[in-house]
Image (tube, helix red, strand yellow):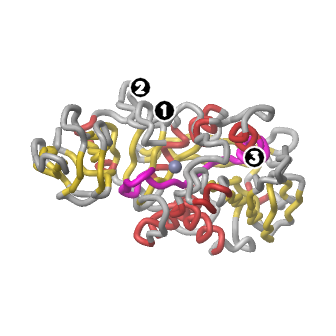
């Protein structure tokens, strides 16, 4: 594990929004103003990066008998001035390439000479999946169900544990970058565990996304990070297998806003409005009994819908009988399947209820949409 500076996270409440303040803790444990501290070299993955410089490193040399490539790039911008270590992770699901591009752009525009703190980017974690267009690892496992991992188990476990111990454990905060899975798209959204005040404060400053509250599945990177005391959020936007600038740009803007919030960059962060927080969301699925069919939505991603509104149909190609899909509540389409053939039970529309209509944010019983739905992270 690389050595790192120790940063104290302290919470304060300003105007009803929980914010995080960072104070540098010196070797003797005394608190000093960060502007009084000189920046030290940053050590990670066996490398040392000098203040005010960037480095491209390689993490996880292959140990496979067939020389299967498990390594991944690791990009570091070590600021000239002290500050927190923010980590960006992309490509945990190899086909979710919008996140890989968000990571690339965010790193490319970071100037280490003016940066306060350190930006660590693992942009392409499932390297093989990225090349082959697959969500999964070479052992067919979903890497985002194996964190924090075990070094002596499956390939997914091995990669997860190395990433977690070498990179994630060095982070003061984490943003994990994803898209919707399979043939679906997500409205740009932050997924966050509202019970983690520091994570939620990061989410509130992501600028241009909605916030969807939930802990995330067991074994997901962000859930494991939060359990280890590292504030973590996920940005989910668009669909897999293609670059979508309209979903990439809000991601980059959100990362910049969070870096401003963490005082890594100059400038004011942008706060997401209260009514863009979704604490209640469920998937509408193909009803049982119609045998699936051909799905055609009639409302776009982001549409506001009313309870019982007609929003699409599933047509049986054998009987030509059409089954209408109606919204089950007043809400907003925050995720949706593309027009495609669908089987019984296939998830069609993710309908969320935002703002005060969904109840208080910090209630344990608030619907954890990402907990019970494997389509989510
Ligand atoms: Zn994903």
Residue 202 visible within the image: no
Disc 1 residue: CB within 8 Å of ligand 1 = no
Label 3–label 1 contact, CB within 8 A: no
Q: Which range of residues does the magenta coloring cover?
A: 162-189
Q: Is residue 164 magenta?
A: yes
Point out residue 16 in the picture as x, y percentages from the top left corner.
40, 43
Mark on residue 170? 3
Asked if residue 275 lies left or right of residue 219, the reply is left
In this view, which residue lies farthest toward the front?
318
Sequence-first disc among 3 and 1: 3
Write the residue at 69% across / 74% down.
Answer: 111
Say which residue appears at 87% left-offset and 39% top-offset.
28
Q: Is residue 268 above or below residue 290?
A: below
Q: Do residues under tags 1 and 2 come within 8 Å of each other at their CB atoms? A: yes
The CA distance from mark 3 to mark 1 is: 22 Å
Q: Earlier in the sequence, mark 2 or mark 3?
A: 3
Mark 1 lies on residue: 195
Mark seen at residue 364? 2
Q: Is residue 82 left or right of residue 236?
A: right
Binning the other alpha carbons within 10 Å of mark 2 as few (below 14), some (14 to 19) or many (20 upward) gives few
């Amino acid at each position: 594990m690389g050595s790192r500076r120790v940063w104290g996270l302290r919470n304060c409440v300003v105007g009803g929004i929980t914010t995080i303040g960072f104070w540098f803790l010196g070797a003797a444990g005394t608190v000093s103003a960060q502007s009084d501290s000189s920046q030290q070299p940053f050590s990670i993955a066996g490398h040392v990066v000098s203040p005010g410089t960037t480095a491209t490193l390689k993490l996880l040399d292959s140990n496979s008998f067939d020389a299967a490539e498990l390594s991944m790039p690791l990009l570091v911008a070590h600021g000239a001035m002290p500050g927190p270590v923010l980590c960006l992770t992309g490509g945990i699901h190899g086909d979710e390439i919008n996140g890989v591009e968000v990571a690339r752009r965010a790193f490319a525009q970071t100037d280490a000479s003016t940066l306060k703190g350190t930006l660590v980017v693992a942009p392409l974690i499932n390297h093989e999946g990225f090349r082959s267009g697959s969500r999964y690892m070479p052992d067919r496992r979903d890497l985002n169900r194996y964190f924090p991992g075990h070094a002596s188990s499956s390939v997914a476990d091995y990669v997860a544990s190395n990433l977690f111990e070498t990179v994630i454990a060095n982070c003061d905060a984490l943003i994990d970058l994803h898209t919707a899975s399979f043939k679906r798209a997500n409205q740009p959204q932050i997924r966050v565990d509202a019970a983690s005040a520091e994570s939620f404060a990061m989410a509130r400053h992501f600028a241009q996304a909605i916030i969807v509250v939930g802990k995330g599945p067991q074994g997901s990177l962000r859930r494991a990070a939060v359990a280890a005391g590292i504030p973590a959020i996920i940005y989910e936007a668009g669909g897999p297998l293609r670059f979508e600038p309209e979903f990439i740009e809000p991601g980059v803007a959100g990362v910049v806003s969070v870096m401003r919030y963490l005082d890594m960059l100059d400038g004011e962060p942008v706060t997401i409005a209260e009514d863009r927080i979704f604490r209640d969301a469920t998937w509408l699925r193909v009803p049982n009994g119609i045998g699936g069919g051909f799905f055609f939505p009639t409302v776009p991603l982001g549409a506001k819908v009313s309870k019982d509104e007609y929003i699409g149909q599933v047509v049986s190609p054998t009987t030509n009988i059409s089954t209408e899909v109606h919204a089950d509540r007043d809400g907003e389409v925050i995720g949706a399947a593309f027009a495609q053939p669908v089987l019984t039970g296939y998830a069609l529309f993710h309908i969320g209820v935002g703002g005060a209509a969904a109840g208080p944010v910090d209630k344990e019983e608030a619907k954890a949409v990402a907990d019970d739905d494997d389509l989510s992270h």
